[in-house]
Image (cartoon, rainbow, N blue to C red):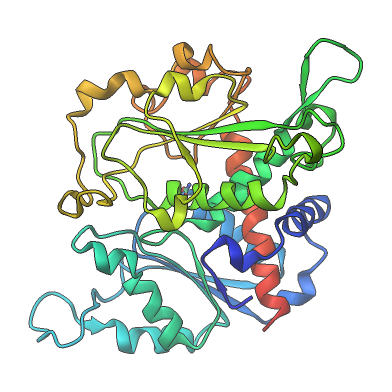
Amino acid sequence: MRIFQHVTDIGDLSVALAEAQEVKRDRYQWQHLGRNKTALLIFFNNSLRTRLSTQKAAMNLGMNVIVLDVNQGAWKLETERGVIMDGDKSEHLLEAIPVMASYCDVIGVRSFARFESRADDYEEKILRQFIEYSGRPVFFMESATVHPLQAFADLITIAENRPTPNPSRKGGEWLHAANERSEALPLTGERGEGLIKVVMTWAPHPKALPQAVPNSFAEWMLAAAKQLSPQRGERGEGPAIDFVITHPEGYELDPQFVKGARVEYDQMKAFEGADFVYAKNWSCPGVTRPEDYGKVLHDYHTMMDWCVSKRQMAVTNDAAFLHCLPVRRNMIVTDDVIESPRSLVIPEAANREISAQVVLKRILENL
Ligand code: CP
């Protein structure tokens, strides 16, 4: 692997999930791979989880790690060609990238959507330049449109916690896989009742947030539905992951990420029977009205009934709650839901170390 951006870059998801569990069993067994290799982690934006988990994953693999916060201590970077650089930006990305690349073997970059131009964001203008001018493998640590390390960690968490019928009880009692054993189980299969419903819900937020997290979560869930959920055959019930997206009208995500997903505008209806609820805010993706790209379409005070609370969770199949964090409590989710035993936000964040390690391991194996 030289680029980690899309779900297709990781290949077969069942292999990737198995590798994640192998990493969990002994995360220090590949230290030879990273010996005398350096990971450079470049942040144009803030981070807690990505910064720490990726650094830890690289150290688990025996790598040296350099972390650069571009906006704190480095020269301010110009990203456009042709600009007369008489402002506050002292260095151009076109010099900075090859210079930074000369000090490392692998580059991770975080650069969020800027909301100045939909085309620039959706063409990944910044990350493309790192790929083109660094000559190094580049992995996305949340770009303008994707957050694949998060989506991979989310998938690991779902696989580890997917509900399964309790073999000791007849009549529909469900166990959660993580309570049975510490391994991720197949998302469907032998037990026949393996249909799981995963609902991604928009939730209110006071600021305009990018679409990277929901884009990637949708992309990875749809790929998982195809790859990990063989058609259940004769009766033709279809895939064993039922992936549903719910959001107010106007927040439709870009078809390149959500093609084939079911969209239900009625949040309560979407939540019915859900096994996993994945909450996230995103601003307008500008799909139906490009002029609204990056906007918050409604005053959030009028949208508070979208905040995930006991009311919505009551109609689920005792759903687990997921959020990538950081989360604004009582905007996105109420205190009682995020603090409930069904909240997986902490193991989900812990799995960021695992997803990053699988990706870095794959890159090191191909250097
Ligand atoms: N979920 C996530 O990427 O967290 P950080 O923004 O803190 O890295």
Report the front residue among 120 and 89.
Answer: 120
Q: Position of residue 115 (x, y in %)?
A: 22, 57
- One can see residue 120 in this view: yes
Q: Quadrant of residue 318?
A: top right
| Residue sitting at x 20%, y 54% | 290
Q: Position of residue 221 (x, y in %)?
A: 58, 46
| Residue sitting at x 41%, y 23% | 267
| Residue sitting at x 80%, y 38% | 234
Q: Quadrant of residue 239?
A: top right
Residue 90 higher or lower than 156, as above or below: below
Q: Is residue 41 left or right of residue 361?
A: left
Q: Is residue 41 left or right of residue 185?
A: left
**Where does the N terminus fall, quadrant-wise?**
bottom right
Q: Position of residue 241 (x, y in %)?
A: 65, 38
Q: Quadrant of residue 42?
A: bottom left
Residue 9 higher or lower than 189, as above or below: below
**Where does the C terminus fall, quadrant-wise?**
bottom right
